[in-house]
Image (cartoon, helix red, strand yellow):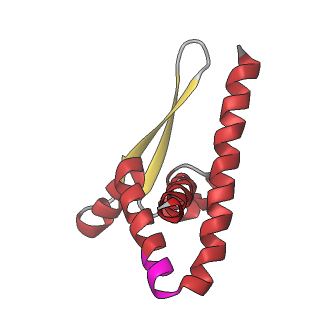
């Protein structure tokens, strides 16, 4: 039972990190670029808001919608990680551990930043 909860927790962290990597991180913007157009709008105070416009129609639009939705991408990222682990456990486990540790580090950093910013 403990192993199943640990596995669940590790997969949760790994899926969290992979999803954020694909949906938000600048390093993977090349994946989103064919499907999204980023529009920056400046308000009167000089603050810049960034909006996403989905490109194309059909499959291109569907992928664009998928990549703009954290919840939708999260399901697919989890499915991919679980499939890799199920069929290629030796190769998938290091990737899952690395993503899980990076996810946990990101959560810890967010908590510390909130505490410091108070």
Image coordinates for residue 89, horizontal then vertical, percent: 55, 83
Secondary structure of the magenta portion, mostly? Answer: helix
- From the viewer's perspective, is residue 79 above or below residue 14? below
Asked if residue 109 lies left or right of residue 49, the reply is right
Nearest the viewer among 15 and 25 is 15
Image coordinates for residue 28, horizontal then vertical, percent: 59, 60
Image coordinates for residue 99, horizontal then vertical, percent: 63, 62
What residue is at 70 percent from the left and 47 percent from the top? 105
Q: Is residue 87 magenta?
A: yes
What residue is at 67 percent from the left and 31 percent from the top? 111
Q: Which residues are magenta?
A: 83-88
Quadrant of residue 60 within the rendered picture? bottom left
Image coordinates for residue 22, horizontal then vertical, percent: 52, 58
Q: Is residue 89 magenta?
A: no
What residue is at 65 percent from the left and 66 percent from the top? 97
What residue is at 35 percent from the left and 57 percent from the top? 66
């Amino acid at each position: 039972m403990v192993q199943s909860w640990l596995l669940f927790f590790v997969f949760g962290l790994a899926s969290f990190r992979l999803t954020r990597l694909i949906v938000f991180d600048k390093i993977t913007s090349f994946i989103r670029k064919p499907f999204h157009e980023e529009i920056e709008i400046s308000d009167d105070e000089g603050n810049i808001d960034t909006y996403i416009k989905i490109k194309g129609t059909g499959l291109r639009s569907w992928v664009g919608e998928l990549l703009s939705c954290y919840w939708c991408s999260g399901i697919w990222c989890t499915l991919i990680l679980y499939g890799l682990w199920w069929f290629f456990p030796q190769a998938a486990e290091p990737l899952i551990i690395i993503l899980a540790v990076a996810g946990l580090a990101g959560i810890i950093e967010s908590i510390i930043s909130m505490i410091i910013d108070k």
